[in-house]
Amino acid sequence: LERGALKNEPVTSKLVEEVDRRERQVQNAVKKFETAVERDTELRAAQQAFEKAGRDADAAEAAAAKSAGAMAEARTSLEKAAARLQQKQLQDRRDPNRRSKKK
């Protein structure tokens, strides 16, 4: 709707035509580039290597995030265990039967 309204305005119609022309130029350039890559084995190999590197980087990032999560869980578990141990040690110190247990 907006594009149709812009085409009907004398001031903007030339601008819309220019935008359309530029969009076609970009589309043609992209097609030429894709055709050149398909025909050139070195370019195709480079493109495939680049895409693989991107996938590998994504996988490495996911693995790092997973490892960070595991580390956080382990740290939390360790902190809880340390707190339980400290609490148990305090209870043992306060235990009135402590001396009799040692005898």
Image (cartoon, rainbow, N blue to C red):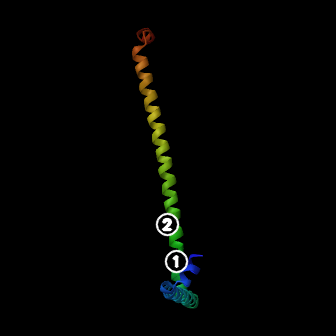
Horizontal placement of 20 versus 99: left or right? right
Q: Amino acid at mark 1?
A: Ala
The image position of residue 77, as x and y in percent, is 49, 37
Q: Secondary structure at mark 2?
A: helix
- Residue drawn at (47%, 32%) of the image: 81
Disc on res. 57: 2
- Residue drawn at (51%, 57%) of the image: 63
Q: Nearer the viewer, residue 42 or 30?
A: 30
- Residue drawn at (56%, 79%) of the image: 5
Q: Nearer the viewer, residue 16 or 29?
A: 16
The image position of residue 56, as x and y in percent, is 52, 67
Q: In the rendered image, which quarter is residue 34 located in? A: bottom right
Disc on res. 41: none
From the viewer's perspective, is residue 96 above or below residue 74? above
Give the Cα distance between marks 1 and 2.
12 Å
From the viewer's perspective, is residue 4 above or below residue 91? below
Q: Secondary structure at mark 1?
A: helix
Disc on res. 49: 1
Q: Residues within 10 Å of mark 1 (few under 14, many from 20)?
A: few
Horizontal placement of 75 versus 20: left or right? left
Comes first in the chain, label 1 or label 2: 1
Q: In the rendered image, which quarter is residue 38 located in? A: bottom right
From the viewer's perspective, is residue 36 above or below residue 68? below
The image position of residue 98, as x and y in percent, is 42, 12
Image quarter of the C terminus:
top left
Q: Residues within 10 Å of mark 2 (few under 14, many from 20)?
A: few
